[in-house]
Image (cartoon, grey):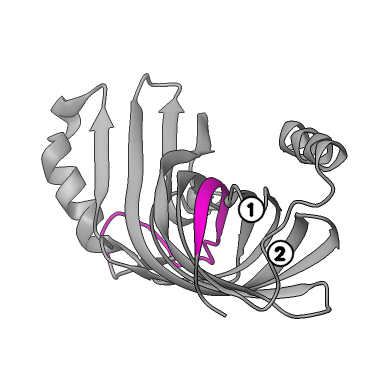
Amino acid sequence: MKYVLTLLLGLIVCSVQAQLPEETWHLGFKSGAAYSRIADLTTTIIRPGVYRGYETEDKYRLGYVGGIFVHRRLANSFIAIQPEFTYSMQGGGYSYKDSLGLEYNADFDYQYFNTAMLFKIYPVAGLHLMFGAQMGFNIANNKVKYSSNQPELGPDLQIQQGLREVLRGNNDFTLPLGIGYEFGEDFPLVIEARFNLGLGDVLRTQANGFGFIETPNKSRSFLLTIGYALPFSQ
């Protein structure tokens, strides 16, 4: 994140006039990467105080994000609005190993259709800060992958199917916070870096025989996108 901020500040020095024009509707297309995780998976999968001699880790997932947005800068102000619709590959992962030699990984490869309303504040030139609200609709809520180093203890595909039935993905309501830069009307490229803070539980634990329990599992994700904005009305 600090390298992105350094780049954006450097761009301001080079071109203080860069920004999309005011009072013009722009239709934009964006594409980039999402780096996401699901918090507190260990608490869900391993009941606290029951087992000993193990190590776990909640892992990040790297995925694609892309979609469209509409942008309008208000006249004589430092504010713009930006509704957007995106597709994202998000979720997270979980790894386990214990003193008996068992190791396994569970990857939650969720996919979302997102709709967001963002507000952008321009402290100077094309540099802008963003905040808003986003709802992500999980369109692959049972996409869990499981693999282990000891499949003889239980076939991996059988355990994977059990996990898909028990751990189901929820929709994801998030608070987006970010920073970006617009190069201007002659070259309407937009670079944005964003952090999405999950506010709801993205994992629903069904009744099961694994010993899994229901706990709040919130999402955390970082997004880096490049977009191109075209004017379509004024």
Residue 211: assigned label: none
Element marked by disc 2: strand
Quadrant of the image occupied by residue 62: top left
Q: Residues within 10 Å of mark 1 (few under 14, many from 20)?
A: many
Residue at 66% x, 61% y: name it: 20
Residue at 60% x, 71% y: name it: 199
CA separation in Å, label 1 and label 2 = 8 Å
Residue 194: assigned label: 1
- Is residue 197 at least partly visible in the picture? yes
Q: Judge whether 231 appears above or below 63 on screen.
A: below
Decide which of 192, 212 is in the foreground and name it. Answer: 192
**Residue at the disc numbered 2:** 130
**Amino acid type, callout 2:** Met
The magenta-colored residue range is: 208-230
Element marked by disc 1: strand
Residue at 44% x, 40% y: name it: 61
- With 206 as the anchor, is 192 left or right in this view? right
Quadrant of the image occupied by residue 197: bottom right
Let me know if residue 66 is in the magenta part: no
